[in-house]
Image (cartoon, grey):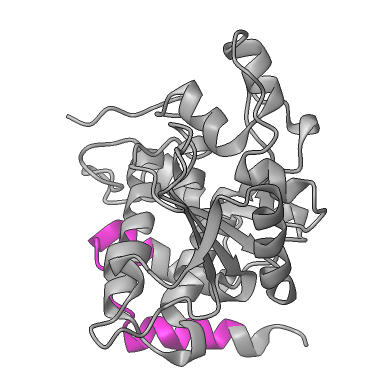
């Protein structure tokens, strides 16, 4: 039986090491040394707008138990290089690397996030235990996201104090929209099977499973209707993505059928310019 969480399923030390939250450290790790030079804190000092994505967002805000890999950060498309340079200035142990996770690569070596910059901790220098091994700085357009739209992101949850930093995460509707939009409209129109199945589909499954919170799925067996928690996941989605998520929660299929593509297109053409 799965265990469903009502708080982040990772340790306070790990959250602090990756984000360097002052309020969390003060109230939950009173003996710790504040870490203003964590990657997120380093970028915060640049005034470059950003949103934490990936596994950190899954675990810290949406309570999905997952292993933490690269600290994935979305920034405006024209500020990717500046963000990388600022982190390196503050934390010179992080060096640019061309290595990419298998989840991002097709069999031919083409990367699903081609204009992202990855920084990896220099192995010659001892890394603080909970600091991320690598940071992936991604243009926001790769996930169809607008980091400047604060209605699509949220601050840190209690016991973090949202007023103490600009570290933000995608809201549930924004996270789901980003995943679905990227499935239907991959970067440069190039379909990456590994990225879609090992990254996007996994994230989608986790968000639904750990928010519906029912081992038996999202459907009421008596009425064959979506459970209330499943219906709630449809709220706030872009209209063109509702049919896809509804279908996924009913069937478990991530197929992008011609009917679902047509539904998205119908909403696209109906939106005012």
Residue found farthest to the left: 1
Q: Position of residue 165 (x, y in %)?
A: 76, 37
Relative to residue 216, is residue 105 drawn left or right?
A: right
Residue nearest the observer in this picture, 25 or 260: 25
What is the quadrant of the N terminus in the image?
Answer: top left
- The reply to whether the magenta stretch includes residue 89 is no
Residue nearest the observer in this picture, 47 or 55: 47
Query: Which residue is pictured at 28% across the width and 81% down the height?
Result: 106
What is the quadrant of the C terminus in the image?
Answer: bottom right
Residue found farthest to the top: 31
Q: Main secondary structure of the magenta part?
A: helix
Q: Position of residue 178 (x, y in %)?
A: 53, 66
Residue nearest the observer in this picture, 195 or 42: 42
User: Can residue 138 be seen in this snapshot?
Assistant: yes
Query: Which residue is pictured at 45% across the width and 25% down the height?
Result: 6
Q: Which residues are magenta?
A: 246-267
User: Can residue 254 be seen in this snapshot?
Assistant: no
Residue nearest the observer in this picture, 108 or 188: 108
Rendered view: 126 above or below 31 = below
Rendered view: 273 above or below 243 = below
Q: Position of residue 141 (x, y in %)?
A: 62, 75
Q: Position of residue 212 (x, y in %)?
A: 37, 41
Residue found farthest to the front: 124
- The reply to whether the magenta stretch includes residue 254 is yes
Rendered view: 96 above or below 110 = above
Relative to residue 203, is residue 107 drawn left or right?
A: left
Query: Which residue is pictured at 41% across the width and 63% down the height?
Result: 245
């Amino acid at each position: 039986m799965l265990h469903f969480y009502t708080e982040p399923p990772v340790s306070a030390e790990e959250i602090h090491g990756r984000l360097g939250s002052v309020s969390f450290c003060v109230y939950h790790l009173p003996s710790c040394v504040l870490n203003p030079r964590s990657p997120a804190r380093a970028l915060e000092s640049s005034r470059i707008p950003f949103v934490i994505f990936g596994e950190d967002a899954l675990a810290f805000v949406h309570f999905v138990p997952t292993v933490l890999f690269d600290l994935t950060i979305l920034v405006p498309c024209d500020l990717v290089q500046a963000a990388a340079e600022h982190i390196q200035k503050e934390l010179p142990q992080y060096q640019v690397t061309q290595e990419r996770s298998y989840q991002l690569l097709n069999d031919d070596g083409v990367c699903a996030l081609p204009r992202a910059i990855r920084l990896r901790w220099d192995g010659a220098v001892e890394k603080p235990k909970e600091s991320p091994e690598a940071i992936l700085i991604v243009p926001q357009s790769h996930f169809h996201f607008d980091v400047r739209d604060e209605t699509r992101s949220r601050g840190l949850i209690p016991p973090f104090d949202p007023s103490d930093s600009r570290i933000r995460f995608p809201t549930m509707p924004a996270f789901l929209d980003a995943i679905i939009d990227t499935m239907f409209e991959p970067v440069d129109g190039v379909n990456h099977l590994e990225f879609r199945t090992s990254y996007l589909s996994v994230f989608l499954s986790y968000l639904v499973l750990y928010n519906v919170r029912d081992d038996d799925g999202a459907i009421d067996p008596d009425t064959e209707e979506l459970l209330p928690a499943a219906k709630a996941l449809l709220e706030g989605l872009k209209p063109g993505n509702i049919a896809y998520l509804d279908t996924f929660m009913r069937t478990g299929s991530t197929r992008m059928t011609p009917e679902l593509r047509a539904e998205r297109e119908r909403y696209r053409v109906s939106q005012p310019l």
